[in-house]
Image (tube, rainbow, N blue to C red):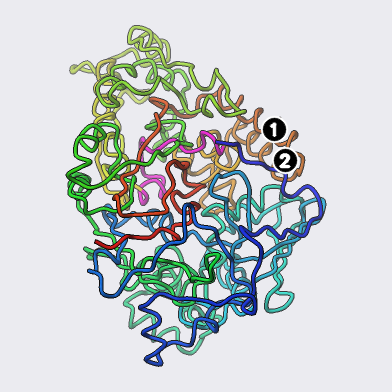
Amino acid sequence: MKHMRYSLFLVLVLVLLAVVPVLTAQDMMYNEAPMLAEQVEAGELPPVEERVPAEPLVVEPIDEIGIYSDPAWSLADRTWNLGLRGTGDGANLTRHIAYEGLVRWDPEWTEVIPNVAKSWEANEDGTEYTFFLREGMKWSDGEPFTANDILFWYEAHATNTEASPAPPNWMVTGGEVGTVEAIDDYTVKFTFAAPNGLFLQRLATPDGLAILQYPQHYAEQFHPDYNPDGIDALMEEAGVETWVDLWELKVSGDGNWSTPQPQLWAWVLENGYTADAVQLTAVRNPYYFKVDPEGNQYPYIDYVQWDVGADTETLVLKALNGEIDFQDRHISALSNKAVFFDNQEAGDYTFAETIPSSMNTATISFNLTHEDPVMREVFQNQDFRIAMSHAINRQEIIDLIYVGQGEPYQLAPRPSSPFYNEQLAKQYTEYDPELANQLLDDAGYGERDADGYRLGPDGERISFAVDVIPTLMPEQVDVIELVVGYWQAVGIDAQMNVIERTLFYERKESNAHDVGVWGGDGGLDVVLEPRWYFPYSNESIFGELWQYWYNGDPRGEEPIEPIQQQMDLYNELKATADPAAQADLMNEILQIAADNFWAMGITLPAPGYTIRKNNFMNTPASYPNAWLYPHPGPTNTFQYYIVGS
């Protein structure tokens, strides 16, 4: 896979990158799905020519022009069937239906290309970005989408300190929040006090999607600045105590999933993703703004439907039975691949390859900002963390859990990355329990209680919980079961705490966790995803209070000096438009991470796989697996199609 380029903002340029040449409504005849044609004939929808913008985005399919779902087919043949795990799996929805920003990644993850914005201009120093929208574009309910909707996001949410305690960090440069101006209905300008060298790339990641998820005509009713007389009645009706609770429920954050609302996506939700949901369905958006080269309005498939499963095993069984059309998330553990391989003919499916951007199968983060001062002292002791790493038998984990695939690895860029740092990647990965015991003794934890567990500086047993989510990467539970055993063997009373994802987030966001386990993002997308290299975002589980401070959240706490140094370097990186200077600064950040060993990993992930039904077409044979490239979204899921049975 090619590496991402970071030079899009270097010169003033009017970007007119389309997947194929721009066509207008006067240049081509449009076609639509049969289910929409029926609604037009019944007078329920305007003709397709009035629903698409004047300059729709024309996207070349992966393999061939697809076919629409036929209303005469069974519902299953008109539906992309998937699975969700529990109630905290909203990222799966982002990946499959909601990847629609002003710009987007191309399928190869090599550059930023137009999307909702048909083009843009940027000045030389990266302080001004002007986006040109598509005239006549509409929300899924047929209401006009304009630059005023983006301005509404900025004023009602992003810079409203009640709705959003801190503005998006990618909107802040030079210590100031950037401004947004609607020049006219189809032109919007972002201005920054200092260069924002990564702005376009951020807009192409899930970070930038929120800009387009606040339709003013719908959302303003839930905001006191726009509906002062009616807000109390809506709060009472919803059973919430504050307007912010109402806003989160109906509009922002998980409100995108729990409350169906107008969107710009290819499919829009018919029902809410709520705690009692057992199935979630999205239906095609009749006003979607993309077409294929023959004028067929996307998407080809009528519905997307997720079963909200209770356990991973259920999803695996559904995939084996041929009841999942195209999915890797939750089911593609390496331990399952042999079973999937043997069952291909019976399940009528095949495989696609996923190329991990992740650099670790399991990140282990001691909470260095723990509320308990004793636990904080222990966890901030670098020799303690080094001892804990040497106590882990990574090769045994690789052999038992990952069927021999992978290599011992810490939290570091992948070997194929230009940012690879061997010290950061390989230090303290040797299994050496004798050294671990010696380090713990030398760190001052040599005294033990009657059960053989080591005592902390307060004379009490060093005991803590390791939070792990069974639905994120199911094999992590098996990994952590081994890890706590290794730690107990050197006298540390670690206990595995298997919890649901929503509770996991609640604990870490309130800084109530001891140790958290997650996936290893940032192996290839190093500059854009530095969460494990310094406390950059709320996913930096090892330093929640420090990342709050960095992001201007009042819950924050001033970090220790090496962390502040990393933050200063990253701010300098964001403020330069020189790729070479960015690389030098990132390497400095990584070296500080290597010297301080903030958190630890287990193994370098091997390539993954996706299950694909044999009648599910226009899917890639291979594609990146990443959050900042929220797979499979950038592969243009709207051009997938099904051959009816």
Q: Position of residue 574 (x, y in %)?
A: 69, 44
Give the farthest residue toward the bottom: 43
Front one among 620 and 256: 620
Amino acid type, residue under disc 1 in the picture: Leu
Residue highlighted by disc 1 = 585
Instruction: Tell me what residue is drawn at x 34 percent, y 12 percent.
Output: 446
Q: Position of residue 592 (x, y in %)?
A: 60, 26
Q: Residues within 10 Å of mark 1 (few under 14, many from 20)?
A: many
Instruction: Tell me what residue is drawn at x 54 percent, y 82 percent.
Output: 49
Marks 1 and 2, the one that precedes in the sequence: 2
**Inter-mark Cα distance, 1 to 2:** 8 Å
Residue highlighted by disc 2 = 572
Amino acid type, residue under disc 2 in the picture: Glu
**Mark linked to residue 291:** none
Instruction: Tell me what residue is drawn at x 81 percent, y 50 percent.
Output: 11
Query: Pointer 1 and pointer 2: residues touching (CB < 8 Å)?
Result: yes
Q: Secondary structure at mark 1?
A: helix
The answer to if 520 sits in the magenta stretch is yes
Q: Quarter-wise, where is residue 34 in the image?
A: bottom left
When the figure is inspected, residue 230 is found, relative to residue 65, above or below; the finding is below
Q: Position of residue 577 (x, y in %)?
A: 76, 44
Q: Position of residue 457 (x, y in %)?
A: 38, 23
Q: Is 497 on the left-hand or right-hand side of 507?
A: left
Front one among 528 and 374: 528
Front one among 594 and 415: 415
When the figure is inspected, residue 8 is found, relative to residue 99, above or below; the finding is above
Q: Secondary structure at mark 2?
A: helix
Residue 82 shows up from this direction: yes
Residue bounds of the magenta highlight: 505-525
Instruction: Tell me what residue is drawn at x 48 percent, y 40 percent.
Output: 540
Residue 364 shows up from this direction: no
Q: Is 79 on the left-hand or right-hand side of 317?
A: right
